[in-house]
Image (cartoon, helix red, strand yellow):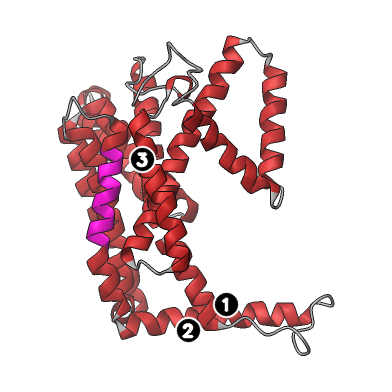
Amino acid sequence: MLQNIFKRSWLKGPWFETLLLTLVSVLLYNIGIGFLLFLIPLQVIFIRRGDSFFITAMVICFSLILFYKLFILSVNSAFAAAGPFMLIEFFSITLLFGGLVFLNLVKLPAVSSVLKLLAAAAAVWILSIPLILFLRGNEGFNTVIREYFANIALFLNTNLSASESINISYNQPGIDVESLLIITREFFLRSYIFDYFVLLLFSWRSGTILGSKSLRVKANTTGLKSFRMPDAYIWPLILGLAGVLVNNFRSLEFLGFLVWNTALIMLFLFALTGFGIIRFLFEKFRLARPLRFLFAFSLVILIMTPRLGIVFLLLIPALGVSEIWIKYRIKQRSED
């Protein structure tokens, strides 16, 4: 009798599956590098179970993460110092959830997925400006950050001074805390929208493919071989690169961060187009798999080579841009 009850129980149904995948998402979020994957189970829920289960899963996921963070803070009695950091963390989670909702639930038939991703990234830039201004003026946040970077600078200076090849006490100045702060801040602000864009794209696409495979249906996504950026997107790339050039001579403040992120996103998308061309040509000329592997391995080595690597990193997007004039794939066009 108990066995029959279990067989008919909700544990065998969609709610158990939703709860299980939601718990996997929470677990991934809290294990460091797993943060990069925590949206994927939620996207799988959307593909397999639809809108209502998807929204429910996100509410449960957000609540569990919040409860866990508050519990950790209460144990450590660190509410006051952690306030700004909690704000940053849950602001980021909200934006990621919002991006996933926008991609899945906002039905715009005439708008491509790429354009929706770009719209989500633009919204992140607009919404993040008040938060950045708030954090700039928050003394508690800046004090904690400064102490953290002071410890990093001390660690680096100690290890550098102990090295036989570098003698800081004579000719080499120590690593300055202010310089380290400025470099880190500039690096983060120039790429945080790009990071958001790539993470959202990766999570949405990976979850869609995994969910579709589990249902044994074809995923509603465009393969790399067929991916191509529309010609009009060359203008955001040009404006982004021009803005980066201007920003190097005169600070554009928040607009400068926007042009840097725009340039990175456009280069990334045209790089995907470049890789799509390479993939298409491999199949067109029936290149053997060992040769494909050799090409990929050689490309990775060249990209990792100092100075030479940046050249090859730019050549791939340049190949994608060149398809505006050279039609490598006449029958292989898609904006998605």
**Is the stretch drawn in magenta largely helix, strand or loop?**
helix
Q: Position of residue 105 (x, y in %)?
A: 18, 34
Q: Quadrant of the N terminus?
A: top left
Asked if marks 2 and 3 touch (Cβ < 8 Å), the reply is: no
Query: Is 287 located above or below residue 175 in the figure?
Result: above
- Choose the circle earlier in sequence order: 2 or 3: 2
Q: At 72% across and 48% down in the image, what residue appears?
A: 305
User: In whole angstroms, how far apart are the C-alphas of marks 1 and 2?
Assistant: 9 Å
User: Does residue 224 appear left or right of residue 55 in this picture?
Assistant: right
Indicate the quadrant where residue 212 lies: top left
Asked if marks 3 and 1 touch (Cβ < 8 Å), the reply is: no
Residue under label 2 = 147
Q: At 32% across and 77% down in the image, what residue appears?
A: 136
Of discs 2 and 3, which sits in the foreground?
Answer: 3
User: In whole angstroms, how far apart are the C-alphas of marks 2 and 3?
Assistant: 43 Å
Residue 152, numbered label: 1
Q: At 34% across and 75% down in the image, what residue appears?
A: 75
Of discs 3 and 1, which sits in the foreground?
Answer: 3
Front in this rendered view, residue 6 or 114: 114
Q: Amino acid at mark 3?
A: Trp
Which residue range is magenta in the image?
Answer: 116-128
Q: Secondary structure at mark 2?
A: helix
Q: Amino acid at mark 1?
A: Ile
Query: Is 138 located above or below residue 210 in the figure?
Result: below
Q: Position of residue 4 (x, y in %)?
A: 23, 22
Is residue 274 in view? Answer: yes
Q: Quadrant of the C terminus?
A: top left
Indicate the quadrant where residue 209 lies: top left
Q: Amino acid at mark 2?
A: Glu
- Choose the circle earlier in sequence order: 1 or 2: 2
Q: At 44% across and 19% down in the image, what residue appears?
A: 226
Q: Secondary structure at mark 1?
A: helix
